[in-house]
Image (cartoon, rainbow, N blue to C red):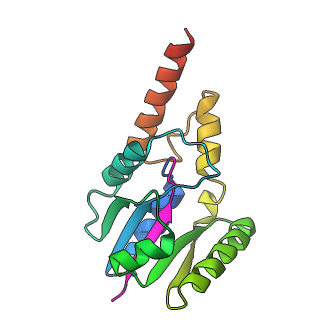
Amino acid sequence: MIKAIFPGSFDPITNGHVEVIEGASHMFEKLYVVIMTNTSKKYLFTEKERLELARKVFENNEKVEVIARPAELTVEVAHELGAGAIVRGLRNTADFNYERDIAGINKTLDPDLNTVLLFTRPEDSFISSSMIKETVFFGGDVSTLVPKPVAAALEEKLRNRNNEKK
């Protein structure tokens, strides 16, 4: 079987991510969830926090290993880990267009590395890390949209932010 990577910033990891990762873990010998850096994003959680949260979420799935590679290209990480595929999740057509372009760049960099696109369930298609952060920022409850450890960490971040305002 093939090893695969699922790269992302995971700030924070959502139920949509979990769904794709769990599904992909059944398709591959090993799935590496790779915490990476997207230079166009502003992060709520540090790299270390994102790594720890993702590890908590997948601690009982022995086919999933969570690692951080914040300063490497996706194709370089795939080579390093011996992965033959990149897994990406799709919520909608906007995601498809974005992922198609990234897959094209990755294919140019490594013609032998394939991208596998997995759709989220329709009921999870609206969940994004950005919307989660925005909702939490204004005091909304996202506990049904993220794993329990993430909900607790978001609540702690919100509490700390509110204490700083006082």
Q: How many marks?
A: 0
Horizontal side, residue 94 vs residue 89: left or right: right
Image vertical order of residue 67 relative to residue 158, above or below: below
Q: Residue at x 40, y 79 (%)?
A: 79
Residue 26 seen in render: no
Q: Residue at x 38, y 53 (%)?
A: 54
- Residue 129 lies, in percent from the top left, at 58, 49
Q: Is residue 8 magenta?
A: yes
Horizontal side, residue 62 vs residue 89: left or right: left
Image vertical order of residue 116 relative to residue 9, above or below: below
- Residue 20 lies, in percent from the top left, at 49, 67
Image vertical order of residue 162 relative to residue 126, above or below: above
Residue 30 seen in render: yes
- Residue 88 lies, in percent from the top left, at 54, 71
**Part of the protein shown in magenta:** 1-11
Determine the residue located farthest toward the top in the rendered image. Answer: 166
Horizontal side, residue 84 vs residue 39: left or right: left
Which quadrant of the figure has residue 3? bottom left
- Residue 38 lies, in percent from the top left, at 57, 55
Instruction: Specify the quadrant that holds the C terminus.
Output: top right
Q: Residue at x 73, y 72 (%)?
A: 97
Q: Is residue 134 magenta?
A: no
Image vertical order of residue 154 relative to residue 121, above or below: above
Q: Residue at x 68, y 77 (%)?
A: 100
| The one of 51 and 121 positioned closer to us in this rendering | 51
Instruction: Specify the quadrant that holds the N terminus.
Output: bottom left
